[in-house]
Image (cartoon, rainbow, N blue to C red):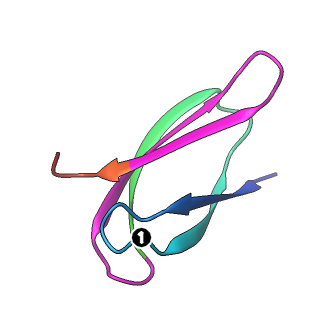
Amino acid sequence: MLEPATLQCPYCWELLEVFVDPSVRDQEYVEDCQVCCQPILIHVVFDEAGELHLTATPENE
């Protein structure tokens, strides 16, 4: 089951909702911003306690 998460677009600063798969502890993927359509590199990590850590950076950095 996918888990919802909120991130801030590194281009337009809008808050976006994404859905991540908690069965994969460390994942990285690119998703376009739902507002400005710029590509965001999303890095998701679930730690030992199952806590979600999410970073969002511009894909072209």
> With respect to residue 10, does 25 lie above or below?
above
Q: Is residue 38 magenta?
A: yes
In the image shown, does 32 or 53 lie closer to the viewer?
A: 53
| Position in image of residue 13 (x %, y %) | 42, 70
Q: Give the image quarter of residue 16.
A: bottom right
Q: Give the image quarter of residue 34.
A: bottom left
Question: What residue range appears in magenta?
Answer: 34-56
In the image shown, does 24 or 5 lie closer to the viewer?
A: 5
In the image shown, does 21 or 56 lie closer to the viewer?
A: 56
- What is the number of callouts on the image? 1
| Position in image of residue 37 (x %, y %) | 31, 78
Kind of residue sitting beneath label 1: Trp
**What residue is disc 1 on?**
13
Q: Which residue occupies the extreme bottom position in the image?
A: 35
Q: Which residue occupies the extreme front position in the image?
A: 13
| Position in image of residue 1 (x %, y %) | 82, 51
Q: Which residue occupies the extreme top position in the image?
A: 48
Side of 16 relative to 11 (left or right): right
Q: Give the image quarter of residue 61.
A: top left
Q: Residue at x 35, y 60 (%)?
A: 10
In the image shown, does 20 or 16 lie closer to the viewer?
A: 16
Q: Residue at x 27, y 71 (%)?
A: 38
Q: Residue at x 77, y 15 (%)?
A: 48
Side of 49 relative to 45 (left or right): right
Instruction: Provide the secondary structure element on which disc 1 rests.
Output: loop
Q: Residue at x 48, y 75 (%)?
A: 14
